[in-house]
Structures are given as C-alpha cells and as structure tokens.
Amino acid sequence: MTGYKKATIYKLIYERKIPFHKPAHGGRRVFFKSAEIDKWLQANRIETNEEFFLKHRENKKVETNNKAQFQRKLQALKSLLFIFTTFQNVIQKYKTQIQKLEEKVAKYESDNWMIENLFIDEFINTSKDENE
C-alpha cells in the first residue's frame, strides 16, 4: 500500500511515525487501517509551483499591507511623542513659575514675620517704658 520495504515500515513503527494498532492481548503483530495510512501518506503534501508562487504573491501583499500599517502606527506614535513633548515643556514652564511664586510667598511670609516681630518688640519696649 505504501510502497515501502518491510524494514522501513518496522523502522517507522519503532519511531512511532506511522499510525498502527496492536491487539489488546499484546503480541508482536501490528495492524494498520487503510484510511489512517491514506491520511498519513497524504499529510505531507508538497504544493505545486503555481500554488507556491500564488501563496508567495499573497504573502507579499500581506507584507506590503503590514508595512503600511506599521508606517501608520509609527506616524501616530511620532505625533503622540510630539504632543507629549510639547506638554512636558508646558508643564516644565509652569513648574518654574510655581517655584518662583513659592519663593515670593516664602519671602513675603518671612518679611511679614519680621514685621510682626518688630511690631511685637516695639510694643514690648513701649510697655516697659510706660511701666518704668
């Protein structure tokens, strides 16, 4: 049925590359189902040149489409990168402005604190003078 020599069949059985059956009681005999052997023989079909070139042409179209999709995705990512970089620059600008405002507030608070201390010192000195 296969055209193989007996030794080749035994080798394929040993390597478990061909479908076969053994009786439930064991023994040395092996059996084959013709439908399984047909299926096994037809499993490794080699395509014709025409099929190969047609498949290759379709793969080429898929590759071209994939390249175009890749280019679109890359362009979208570049646009997002530009937007994020712009936002990063704006955020950095506002951080700098916030830092300057915080410094001004801190200076104002320290100046105000010094003015309050001067006022308290003057008040205490004036009170001492009146008591004496």
Image (cartoon, rainbow, N blue to C red):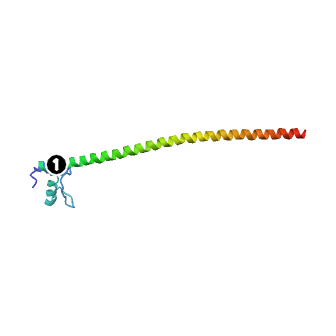
Give the number of callouts: 1
- Quick one: quadrant of the N terminus? bottom left
Q: Which residue is mark 1?
A: 11
Q: Residue at x 51, y 40 (%)?
A: 93
Quarter of the image where one finds residue 42: bottom left
Residue furthest bottom as drawn: 24
- Quick one: quadrant of the C terminus? top right
| Residue 128: image location, x then y, percent | 86, 39
On screen, residue 5 above or below 111? below
Residue furthest right as drawn: 132
Q: Residue at x 50, y 43 (%)?
A: 91
Q: Residue at x 23, y 49 (%)?
A: 62
Residues 32 and 99: in front is 99
| Residue 8: image location, x then y, percent | 13, 48
| Residue 127: image location, x then y, percent | 85, 41
Circle 1: element type? helix
- Decide if residue 46 is in sight here: no
| Residue 82: image location, x then y, percent | 41, 43
**Residue 21 located left or right of residue 86:** left
Crowding at label 1, few (<14), some or many (≥20) Cα neighbours within 10 Å? few
Quarter of the image where one finds residue 19: bottom left
- Decide if residue 101 is in sight here: yes
**Residue 71 located left or right of residue 41:** right
**Amino acid type of the residue that numbered disc 1 sits on in the rendered structure:** Lys
Residues 5 and 112: in front is 112
Residues 17 and 13: in front is 17
